[in-house]
Image (tube, rainbow, N blue to C red):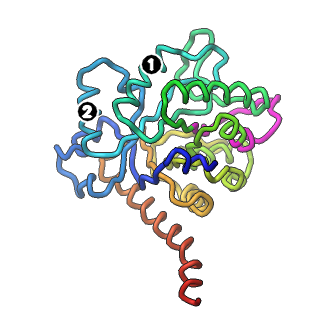
């Protein structure tokens, strides 16, 4: 059955990552060029920032929930690790999800450390059948434990494994099917990895199972000449906007988020990127409907 239909996954529209620098503006406590609550359809929060028993973080989260639809996005689940799942982490994650009550939650297709050492990076996995079996089983356990649909995100990468047996998009698609989970499709990460590894990012878009993409990310990166670095420190570049257009053409209306995590500008700048995404969505989704409308009128 269609994953999004089975779980009644909604298209939330366009939002931004809620960052502490912007809380006053998001809450309406600081002046802004425009009212973010009138522009933004939703916000994403970093799950780990709210895995606490109380205090200011949870008060801020409650205010976000009062004003916006909120989706939790994790950065340290390490779903691809070979160590056992961290039940303490999952218990705290479930508490955050239960507080927010989102239609889905997400984390990355990666590993973040080994032998008890957390290196605070999102490291890619080898593209193998063994990885597919290992990660799929872990995702099923996480999804069952938390009790809410889970979406796994493709990461940007700067190295490749000699043991890989297939392209990343084939592995991700098969993991989503075997784990029966959603996909968080990061257009910027695909563009960065395509440049770094020499593949066509359009092939990645075209290979994704349409019914499993529940969310998309857009962000900026830094061009280092020989490679691209996923920094989330700039405007979304034109080729990534083009990739987003292709993704909209394939997946239709999917909740879209603007990420900006380094050199964070004023809230109005990030909201401006969200407005651009709204305009691109309107153009693409309107164009997709146009032929059917024309045919209906002709008949």
Mark 2 / mark 1, whichever is N-terminal: 2
Q: In terms of secondary structure, where does tag 2 sit?
A: helix
- Toward which corner of the image does residue 70 lie, by quadrant? top left
In-image side of 292 versus 103 (left or right): right
Q: Position of residue 15 (x, y in %)?
A: 39, 50
Query: What residue is rendered at 63% in x and 53% in y?
Result: 210
Does the magenta-highlighted stretch encompass residue 80? Answer: no
Q: CA distance from mark 2 to mark 1?
A: 21 Å
Up-down: is 143 above or below 227? above
**What number of labels is visible?**
2
Magenta extent: 152-173
Nearer to the camera, 126 or 68: 68
Label 1: few (<14), some (14–19) or many (≥20) C-alpha neighbours in 10 Å:
some
Up-down: is 161 above or below 12? above
Does the magenta-highlighted stretch encompass residue 163? Answer: yes
Is residue 188 visible in this depiction of the protein? no
Up-down: is 152 above or below 288? above
Query: What residue is rendered at 38% in x and 24% in y?
Result: 95
Query: What residue is rendered at 56% in x and 55% in y?
Result: 240
Up-down: is 203 above or below 259? below
In-image side of 132 versus 273 (left or right): right
Q: Which residue is mark 1?
A: 91
Q: Position of residue 205 (x, y in %)?
A: 66, 53
Q: Position of residue 159 (x, y in %)?
A: 70, 32
Q: In terms of secondary structure, where does tag 1 sit?
A: helix
Q: Which residue is mark 2?
A: 60
Nearer to the camera, 18 or 191: 18
Query: What residue is rendered at 40% in x and 30% in y?
Result: 97
- On-image quarter of the C terminus: bottom right
- Toward which corner of the image does residue 163 lie, by quadrant? top right
């Amino acid at each position: 059955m269609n994953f999004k239909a089975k779980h009644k996954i909604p298209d939330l529209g366009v939002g931004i990552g809620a960052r502490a620098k912007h809380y006053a503006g998001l809450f309406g406590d600081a002046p802004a060029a425009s009212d973010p609550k009138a522009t933004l359809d939703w916000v994403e929060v970093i799950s780990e920032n709210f895995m606490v028993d109380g205090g200011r973080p949870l008060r801020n989260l409650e205010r976000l929930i009062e004003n916006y639809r909120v989706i939790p996005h994790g950065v340290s689940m390490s779903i691809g690790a070979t160590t056992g799942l961290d039940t303490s982490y999952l218990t705290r994650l479930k508490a955050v999800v239960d507080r927010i009550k989102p239609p889905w939650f997400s984390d990355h297709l990666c590993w973040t450390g080994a032998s008890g050492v957390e290196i605070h990076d999102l490291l890619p996995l080898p593209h193998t059948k063994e990885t597919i079996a290992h990660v799929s089983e872990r995702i099923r356990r996480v999804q069952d434990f938390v009790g809410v649909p889970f979406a796994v995100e493709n990461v940007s990468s700067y190295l490749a494994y000699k043991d890989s047996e297939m392209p990343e998009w084939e592995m991700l698609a098969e993991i989503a099917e075997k784990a029966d989970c959603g996909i968080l499709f990061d257009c910027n990460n695909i563009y960065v990895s395509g440049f770094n590894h020499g593949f066509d990012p359009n092939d990645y878009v075209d290979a994704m199972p349409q019914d499993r993409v529940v969310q998309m990310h857009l962000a900026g990166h830094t061009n280092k000449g020989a490679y691209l670095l996923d920094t989330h420190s700039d405007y979304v570049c034109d080729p990534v906007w083009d990739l987003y257009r292709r993704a909209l053409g394939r997946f239709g209306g999917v909740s879209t988020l603007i990420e900006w995590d380094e050199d964070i500008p004023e809230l109005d700048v990030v909201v401006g990127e969200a407005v651009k995404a709204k305009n691109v969505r309107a153009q693409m989704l309107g164009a997709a409907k146009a032929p059917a409308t024309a045919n209906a009128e002709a008949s």
